[in-house]
Image (cartoon, rainbow, N blue to C red):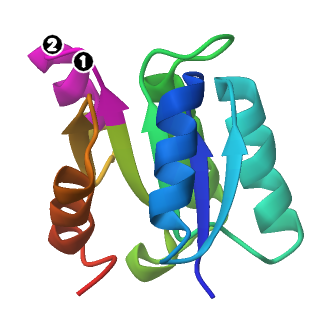
Amino acid sequence: MKRILIAEDDMVSRKFLSKFLSQYGDCDSVVDGLEAIDAYMLGIKEKTPYDLICLDIMMPKIDGVKVLKTIRDLEKQQELSESEKAKIIITTVLGESHVVQSAFEFGCNAYANKPLDMKKITEVLKRIDFIE
């Protein structure tokens, strides 16, 4: 069973993602960037890493881009191969191209604009080969 981490401070978005993505794997949800990093590290420590991480850019404590960079740095330290790395989708209401650009520079696999809907998320999941 695939493992999915949803890092989203908005309760409606978090519940929607959790309900929708639960058909593809076991979902854990966190509400801020610090919890996202803690959950990621716990998954590695327990040898149950996340296959997919949905990261909101605008989150309390640590923003999504910093979380993304931290996770990619941790993956480098562990010398994970490309196939072992988590697939990371950035979600944002920001259409700001520089924010999205920096997310791609730090290694996100895709991004989805909010408001999210099932069609949009399904397309993104197919594009990054998480589902068929």
User: Residue 95, percent across and down?
Assistant: 14, 17
Q: CA distance from mark 2 to mark 1?
A: 6 Å
Q: Residue at x 10, y 18 (%)?
A: 97
Q: Amino acid at mark 2?
A: Glu
User: Residue 60, percent across and down?
Assistant: 63, 11
For the question of whether residue 96 can be seen, the reply is yes
The residue that label 1 is drawn on is 99
Which SS class for mark 2? loop
Front residue (pair 47, 111): 111
Structural crowding at the residue carrying mark 1, measured as other residues with C-alpha within 10 Å and reported as few (<14), some (14–19) or many (≥20) = some
User: Residue 113, percent across and down?
Assistant: 21, 32
Residue 96 is marked as: 2
Q: Residue at x 53, y 71 (%)?
A: 51
Q: Residue at x 89, y 71 (%)?
A: 46
Task: State which quarter of the image contains the C terminus.
Answer: bottom left
Q: Is residue 68 magenta?
A: no
Identify the magenta region: 91-103
Q: Amino acid at mark 1?
A: Val
